[in-house]
Amino acid sequence: DGRIPAAYQAHIDRKKLYVLLALAALAVLFVASVSLGPVRVPPLQVLAAFFGQAASPRDQVIVMSIRLPQSLAAAVAGMALSVAGAAMQSILRNPLGSPFTLGISQAAAFGAAFSVIILDSGIMTSTQEGAITIINPYLTTAMAFVSCLAAALVVVAVSRLRGATPEVMVLTGVALGALFTAGTMFLQYFADDRQLAAMVFWTFGDVARAKWDTLTFMTVVSVPVIVYFYLNRLNLNAIDAGDETAKGLGVRVERLRLFGMLLASLLTATVVAFLGVIGFVGLVCPHLARWVAGDDHRFLLPLSCLLGALLLVASDTAARLVIAPSVLPVSVLTAFLGAPTFIALLLGRRKR
């Protein structure tokens, strides 16, 4: 009779509820993130500062010039890395795929380092605060993207080999990561003291360096790519069912796979070029989303997006509080969470 079965509708409504709950949690956490730090600003004053009505000029400056762009950058970077990871896992049909595990983040770091040291696209100082100021974001992102592209093409080529298991692809990623890390170390070897200090601080992976111009560039690149993947949510569902099934449904599998890897690499390159290497977000968050909402990309992608933002905003907030007034690099906290999760995933696959 054309009606949707009640059980299926309840199933869909439950997944929508998960997305709404994640959105609400992100909104609350975001205000808390802007509020908390070495100098605390009450949540009501945070909301007032959004409209230029903070109780003191100090609070207005802290919120609008420091904390707000930092928290927004954490949210955008978390969304970008998480969606890139979810897309790579689906495109390659590899549950262990992510920008970090496949060596793509390390490739982006090499490209950005090459741009900054060799092509002079950044101003470098030997202090952690503002170690590198990117003066040519287009060149830096382009070089990071070219390196990402090289790594992504190798991964796609390996995925097409007969007998290429997910473990083989991850080992390929480990090899690529080691190769590009060696390239970055090679550049550092010939750098002077100032350049070396700048590169070490920069590669930590941190959102504390984010400014409004950084945030604007990251958002302009990331949002259209995230929208592209969401518009292809049904095609990604078809690929999950197998290449032959997807082709039978009219999906251009090879085109989507290649173009999807290029765009996922662009997301990774944009984040790494400005914030450094932030590991495991693209691995942990898509798996959490699958655990909560299943493999349907209509809900997997939005939930991955929100969970990525939640994880990175929470990690950034914790990084400000753990050893206040000093600030830890956010990549330290994401690695502490991500490394055990990655090991658990590998052991779980081996048992199955």
Image (cartoon, rainbow, N blue to C red):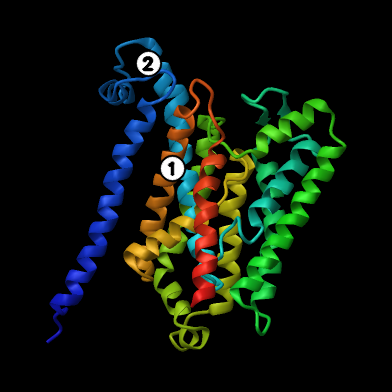
In whole angstroms, how far apart are the C-alphas of marks 2 and 1? 22 Å
Residue 84 in sight from this viewpoint: no
Tell me the residue at 66%/73% (across/down).
Answer: 168
Residue 121, percent from left and from top: 73, 35
Q: Which residue is mark 2?
A: 59
Q: Residues within 10 Å of mark 1 (few under 14, many from 20)?
A: many
Give left or right: position of 325 versus 266.
left
Helix or strand or loop: what does disc 1 sit on? helix
Left or right of 117: which side holds 25? left
User: Badge 2 local density, few (<14 within 10 Å), some, or many (20+)?
Assistant: many
User: Residue 74's spot in the image, x, y percent?
Assistant: 47, 40
145 vs 131: above or below:
below
The image quadrant of residue 64 is top left
Whether residue 55 is situated above or below residue 115 in the rendered picture: above
x and y percentages locating residue 38 in the rendered image: 44, 20
Which residue appears at 22% of the width and 64% of the height?
14
Q: Nearer the viewer, residue 252 or 185?
A: 185
Residue 207 image position (x, y, % from top left): 53, 35
The amino acid at mark 2 is Asp
In this view, 51 is above or below 220 = above
Q: Can residue 281 be seen here? A: yes
Q: Quadrant of the N terminus?
A: bottom left
Q: Pointers 2 and 1 in contact (CB under 8 A)?
A: no
The mark found on residue 256 in the picture is none
Q: Nearer the viewer, residue 109 or 39?
A: 39
Q: Which residue is mark 1?
A: 75
Residue at the image point whose x is 67% and y is 56% from the top: 148
Q: Nearer the viewer, residue 55 or 164?
A: 164
Element marked by disc 2:
helix
The amino acid beneath tag 1 is: Ala
User: Reading the chain from its start, which is encountered first: label 2 or label 1?
Assistant: 2
